[in-house]
Amino acid sequence: MKESTLYKLTALLLRQAGDQFGHHGCSDFDLEEHGFSEKERLAISQAIQDSNGDDERSVEASKYEADWVLMYTVAEVLESRIELQVEFEKEDW
């Protein structure tokens, strides 16, 4: 399977799962417990803020994020890379 196909499939599945998880009660994902450093948590928080188009608030390294928000954010990041990956796959090495 090409990586671009994998990105597309993963993004679609994450969005579908995010729809389902978004209807659950408390759905916080403990980033710190799962080994994400403060630098990584800051990058994740920045990606979420970028995804929401909110440039006004300062970004902090959150310990918890809603699982469905993480799913949507990862899906958006993957989708942004699909076109680049398709072009990369066309290159004749």
Image: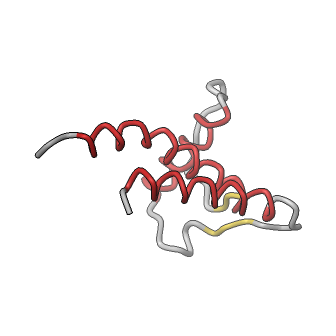
Q: Is residue 13 left or right of residue 46?
A: right
Picture coordinates of residue 73, whole percent (x, y): 60, 48
Q: How many marks?
A: 0
Quadrant of the frame with the N terminus: bottom left
Instruction: Kindly identify the residue that appears in the image at 36 percent across and 37 percent down.
Output: 84
Tell me which corner region of the image, top left, top right, bottom left or bottom right, holds residue 9.
Answer: bottom right
The structure residue drawn at horizontal position 47% and vertical position 54%, both measured from the top left corner, is 7
Q: Residue furthest bottom?
A: 33
- Looking at the picture, the colour scheme in use is secondary structure
Above or below — where is 39 with respect to 20? above
| 59 relative to 43, above or below | above
Position of 71 with respect to 41 (left or right) is right
Give the image location of residue 54, x and y in percent. Answer: 66, 29
Residue ranking furthest to the left: 93
Q: In which quarter of the image is residue 92?
A: top left
Residue 14 vs residue 5, the one in the foreground: 5
Q: Is residue 27 above or below residue 77?
A: below
What residue lies at 49% left-to-right and 48% top-to-bottom? 78
